[in-house]
Amino acid sequence: MSATIDTALSVRAKFFRGLADPSRLALLLALRQGEKTVSMLSEETGLSQSNVSNHLSCLKDCGLVLNRQEWRHVYYRIADEKILTLLSVADEVVADNAQRIADCVNYCVNEE
């Protein structure tokens, strides 16, 4: 495999590994309804505020979320409509294959 193809695949794999994290995925799903603060996301997802902040920082560094400050509050939102489309398509694929995915022994989610 050429270095260019290897790099492109590596970046794609890294992107999907980022989405595979249950906490980051929960935050992205919560942000589908619109922008929210860390405390709102913490309450909605059940994650600690520090955990939410750390994951949002990661998502922001990767370009998946944006933030804006309004006085003391920082609001986060999904950076691009394409991320919303990706999440919707993923929902459809999961709905169509839910049992097969649940039964799959190749990919396991670590329970926290």
Image: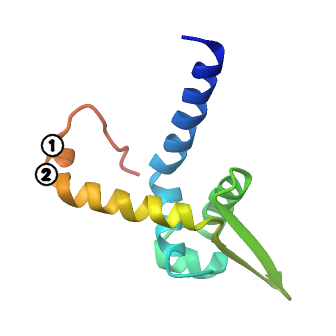
The location of residue 14, given as percent across then percent down, is 57, 37
Looking at this view, name the residue that lies furthest to the top.
1
Give the residue drawn at x 73%, y 52%.
61
Q: Residue 57: x and y, percent?
A: 71, 58
Q: Residue furthest right?
A: 71
Please give left or right for residue 24 compared with residue 104 in the image: right
User: Please, what is the three-letter code of the amino acid marked with disc 2?
Assistant: Gln
Relative height, residue 33 to residue 101 (above, below)? below
Dot 1 falls on a residue whose secondary structure is helix
Say above or below: 24 vs 17.
Answer: below
User: Between residues 21 and 62, which one lies in front from this camera angle?
Assistant: 62
- Residue 71, position in %: x, y? 86, 88
Q: Which residue is mark 2?
A: 99
What residue is shown with label 1?
Answer: 103
Residue visible at 58% across and 20% down in the picture:
6
Would residue 32 appear left or right of 53 to someone viewing this image?
A: left
Q: How many residues crowd mark 1 within 10 Å: few (<14), some (14–19), many (20+)?
A: few
Report crowding for label 2: few under 14, some 14 to 19, many 20 or more residues within 10 A (C-alpha): few
Tag 2 secondary structure: helix
Question: At 50% across and 41% down in the image, what residue appears?
Answer: 17
Image quarter hosting the N terminus: top right
Q: At label 1, which amino acid type do we have? A: Asp
Identity of the residue drawn at 65% across and 20% down: 4
Which residue occupies the foreground of this view, 35 or 53?
35
In space, the residues marked 1 and 2 are separated at their CA atoms by: 6 Å
* Visual colour scheme: rainbow
Q: Position of residue 105 (x, y in %)?
A: 21, 34
Q: Which mark is residue 51?
A: none
- Left/right placement of residue 88 relative to residue 75 reads left
In the displayed structure, 109 sits above or below 11; it is below
Answer yes or no: do the residues labelled 1 and 2 have beta carbons within 8 Å? yes
- Name the image quarter holding residue 48: bottom right
